[in-house]
Every structure is written in structure tokens, then in C-alpha cells.
């Protein structure tokens, strides 16, 4: 239902724009402006109800937005009055009309709600990126505002009077810039109350700046141009009450994605277009220089962030690889690592399988915590005895393996096994039975080696445990 209403509103605005372009909009001006007043009234009432039933910080946020709608409503009424009379004042007095000042105050309230509403914090790097995007959009918006509004006003009207207008325009620029930044970071979960508020801020800010510009150039306000934006902004304030207001999680995702990510850059394109079509102006040159610096800084920050992200991804990949190939309790490699390691055998290989004698009794009598201590103790023995460059692994349970590759002669490999048996027995908690398999050509698969070592281990246990037995293939 909400999606259909939003689509209908968007279609209505598109139709109004089409009517304006074709010149058929003026007969519809009065009903469209009246619709704006009605929708704005409904929005103020709905926002007030949400504020009345909310609590804490959420109540404050709803109240601020309701106040902005209440400030905007008289401006909409005055606009409808001008539409009915059909004779708005000229340029000299047009800029002092309350519509502009009320629009600036409403935009300031919306700006406060956008900045102060969410109670969740973002990392400082993300805040810096958003701040740079906002500054970039604001400077870019200043260029056409100066070229088409403020510069003509300073030239043709009073300086102190135009400075007041500049304050109103500055608030609108800041509101539109922040709205663009926030909309570019819309969370993938879908729209929320702040999404609608950002859209309303953009519509109202654009409307007020366009209103002032038309007064400067035409001496009268062509309300057929601003009426659709008024309806759209009021409608988005109304639809804001249909969505939840996220106060405990950031309403904006960490990084812009998709086409939305380019929203803060749209004013930049407009600023370059204005610069190429307007006469030389020192203020525009300064603004474009600042804008160029902000764009470079933003891209540098993006490259730095991407580099950090790639480093974190590589670190996470290495961590996952380690977890996949190592036993979490003992820190030894596991069966997966052995299969990966076996693919590179090209020389003699010795494989020993070790099974703890008496381990089940320790688990049954003292518990699994004591059993884990024994496993860690045996892993330390293996690490200290197995030569560097060779592999000690835990296959699972109380079963371990040692791979010597390239392997020394059989007698030396067996000596290493005997040392392991003696060192574990010296700890006095468990014993070890060991089966040794040996492949002098390195052509045997890990499965064949494990089968031979298992058979040798069975022989060692059958012979009385606590000893080493060799595979039948060893001569």
C-alpha cells in the first residue's frame, strides 16, 4: 500500500511537471496549491500524533519535525493566496515575502531533526566520509545559488537585505546537501521515517531556492513551477508517519551503494556545468577550487578506506584459512591440512599415527576439561620433538599424526617416534601407541599412507601398547 501511494505521488509530480512544460498547468494551479495545503495540514496532524504517543528522544524528534511542518504550513497558505489572486508582488518586495523566511526556518528544523534524531553512533571514519560528502554537495550547490540568485541580488538589491536572503539560502543548501548524503546511504532493509524526512528536506529546500530565484529574475513568482515540489514535500512529510523511526540503530548504512551512491555528486556535475556557461566570477572560482580539493580529498579517503578494507579482507581470509586447516584446541594442523600438504609430495614420506593409551579413563574419571589438558600437553610434546619444517597434526579425538617430508631414513624416522613415546610417557598421565608408514618414492597417496599407518598402529596396540610398530611395507 505504501509503495503504491509513493508511486502515485511520484507519477503525480511527473504529470505536473509535464503540464508545466507544455503550458497547460496554469488552470490547475489553484487546485494543486490547495492540495499542497491540505496535505501539509494532514502531515502536521499526523506528526503531532506520533509525537504525542512517542517517548524520550523519539518524541523529541517527531516534535521537531511536526514543528517544521507547522512553520511550513503558513507559507503554503500564503502561496495558495497568491495563486488565487494571481498578482504576486514584484522583485523589490518579493524576497521579503514570508514564504522564503518560513521555508528557511522549516528547513533549519528539519536539519536539526536529521542530525540529532538517530541515537546510534557511527565510526569516526564513516562520519568523516559523510561530512566530506556533505561539504562537497554544499559547495557545489553554492555555485548555481551564487550565479543565479545571490550575485544578482547583491548587484541589484541592498547588501544587508541580500545577506538575510543568503542566510536563508545557506540553510536550504545545507539541508539539501545533508538530505542527498543521507539518501545515498539508505539502508538495504528499505525506507524508514528518516528516508521520507530527507526527501521532504530536499523538496522543500529546492522549492524555496527556486522561489527566490524566480522572484529575482521575473519580478513575479511563477507558482506553476514550485507547486509540484510543494505537494511532493508535504506528501513525504505525511508518509514519514507511516514508517518506523530507528532510534537505536543507524538509519543509514556504512557506505553508499548502487546508483544512490552518486547522489552527492549530482550537484558537482551541475556546478561544473554552471561554471562553463557563466562569465568569470572570482567567488565561483574560489568555490570551484574548494570543491576540487574536497573531491580529491574524498577520493583519497575512499582509496585509503578501500586499501584498509582489502587488508582486512586478506587478514580475515588468512584467519579463516588457518581455522579451516588447524585444530582450535591444540593449535596443530588438522586432517584438511594434511590432504592439502599431501598434494605436494615428490620425495620420501614418513607418516606416523599416534593414539593415546588410557585417555578414555581420564575423561571418564576427571572430565573433559582434564582430557583437553592432556591433548594440549601431547601437542606441546609433538611440537618440541618434530623437526622444524615437518608437520604435526591432530586427526580428531585422541588421535594425532606426524608427517616427515622429505623423510629421513626409516631408522631416523622411527627414532623420532620413540622419542615421542618416551616424552609423553614421562609426563605420567597417558601413554602413546604409534604406527609408522614409509614411502621412499613419494608416490603414495595420503589415503594409502593412512591405511598403512593404521594397520601398524593396530599391531602396536596388539603387542601391548606404548610402543612403535612399522607398516608391513617397510623392509
Image: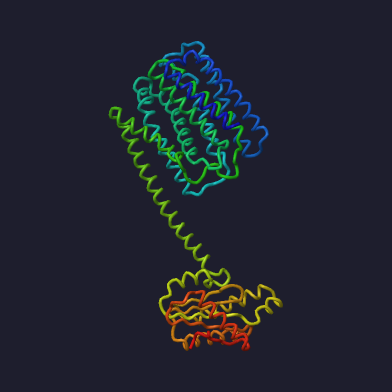
- Decide which of 3, 123 is in the foreground and name it: 3
Q: In this view, does 164 lie above or below 317?
A: above
- Counting from the top left corner in percent of width and height, residue 177 is at 45, 35
The N terminus, quarter of image: top right
- Decide which of 453, 146 is in the foreground and name it: 453
- For residue 173, which quarter of the picture? top left
The residue shown at (51%, 18%) is 79
Look at the image and name its color scheme: rainbow
Outermost residue, left direction? 280
- Decide which of 304, 118 is in the foreground and name it: 304
- Counting from the top left corner in percent of width and height, residue 246 is at 59, 41
- For residue 288, which quarter of the picture? top left
- Counting from the top left corner in percent of width and height, residue 206 is at 45, 27
- Counting from the top left corner in percent of width and height, residue 427 is at 60, 84
Q: How many marks?
A: 0
Q: In this view, does 419 lie above or below 322?
A: below
Q: Is residue 382 above or below residue 231?
A: below
Is residue 357 left or right of 125 when viewed as pictured?
right
The residue shown at (66%, 75%) is 370
Amino acid at each position: 500500500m505504501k509503495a503504491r501511494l509513493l508511486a502515485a505521488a511520484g507519477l503525480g509530480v511527473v504529470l505536473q511537471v509535464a503540464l508545466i512544460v507544455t503550458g497547460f498547468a496554469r488552470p490547475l494551479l489553484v487546485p494543486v496549491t490547495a492540495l499542497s495545503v491540505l496535505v501539509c495540514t494532514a502531515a502536521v496532524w499526523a506528526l503531532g500524533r506520533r509525537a504525542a504517543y512517542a517517548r524520550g528522544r523519539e518524541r523529541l524528534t517527531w516534535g521537531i519535525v511536526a514543528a517544521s511542518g507547522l512553520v511550513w504550513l503558513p507559507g503554503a497558505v500564503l502561496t495558495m493566496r497568491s495563486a488565487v489572486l494571481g498578482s504576486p508582488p514584484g522583485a523589490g518586495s518579493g524576497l521579503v515575502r514570508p514564504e522564503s523566511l518560513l521555508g528557511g526556518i522549516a528547513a533549519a528544523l528539519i536539519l536539526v531533526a536529521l542530525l540529532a534524531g538517530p541515537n546510534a553512533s557511527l565510526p569516526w571514519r564513516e562520519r568523516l566520509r559523510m561530512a566530506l560528502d556533505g561539504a562537497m554537495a554544499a559547495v557545489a550547490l553554492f555555485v548555481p545559488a551564487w550565479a543565479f540568485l545571490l550575485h544578482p541580488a547583491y548587484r541589484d538589491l541592498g547588501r544587508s537585505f541580500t545577506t538575510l536572503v543568503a542566510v536563508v539560502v545557506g540553510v536550504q543548501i545545507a539541508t539539501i546537501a545533508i538530505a542527498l548524503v543521507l539518501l545515498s546511504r539508505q539502508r538495504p532493509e528499505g525506507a524508514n521515517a528518516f528516508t521520507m524526512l530527507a526527501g521532504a528536506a530536499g523538496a522543500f529546500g529546492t522549492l524555496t531556492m527556486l522561489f527566490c530565484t524566480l522572484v529575482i529574475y521575473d519580478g513575479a513568482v511563477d507558482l506553476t513551477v514550485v507547486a509540484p515540489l510543494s505537494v511532493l514535500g508535504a506528501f513525504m512529510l505525511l508518509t514519514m508517519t507511516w514508517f518506523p523511526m530507528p532510534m537505536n540503530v543507524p538509519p543509514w548504512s556504512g557506505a553508499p551503494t548502487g546508483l544512490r551512491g552518486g547522489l552527492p555528486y549530482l550537484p558537482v556535475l551541475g556546478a561544473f556545468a554552471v561554471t562553463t556557461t557563466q562569465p568569470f566570477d572570482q567567488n565561483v572560482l574560489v568555490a570551484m577550487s574548494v570543491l576540487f580539493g574536497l573531491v580529491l580529498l574524498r577520493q583519497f579517503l575512499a582509496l585509503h578506506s578501500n586499501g584498509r578494507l582489502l587488508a582486512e579482507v586478506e587478514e580475515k581470509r588468512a584467519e579463516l584459512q588457518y581455522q579451516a586447516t588447524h585444530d582450535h584446541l591444540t593449535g596443530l594442523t588438522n586432517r584438511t591440512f594434511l590432504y592439502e600438504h599431501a598434494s605436494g609430495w615428490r620425495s620420501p614420506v614418513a607418516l606416523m599415527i599416534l593414539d593415546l593409551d588410557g585417555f578414555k579413563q581420564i575423561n571418564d574419571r576427571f572430565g573433559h576439561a582434564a582430557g583437553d589438558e592432556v591433548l594440549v600437553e601431547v601437542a606441546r610434546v609433538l611440537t618440541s620433538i618434530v623437526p622444524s619444517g615437518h608437520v604435526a597434526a591432530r586427526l580428531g579425538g585422541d588421535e594425532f599424526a606426524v608427517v616427515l617430508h622429505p623423510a629421513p631414513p626409516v631408522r631416523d624416522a622411527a627414532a623420532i617416534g620413540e622419542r615421542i613415546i618416551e616424552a609423553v610417557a614421562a609426563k605420567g598421565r597417558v601413554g602413546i601407541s604409534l604406527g609408522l608408514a614409509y614411502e621412499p618414492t613419494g608416490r603414495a597417496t595420503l589415503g594409502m599412507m593412512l591405511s598403512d599407518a593404521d594397520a601398524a598402529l593396530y599391531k602396536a596396540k596388539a603387542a601391548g601398547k606404548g610402543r612403535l610398530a612399522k607398516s608391513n611395507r617397510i623392509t
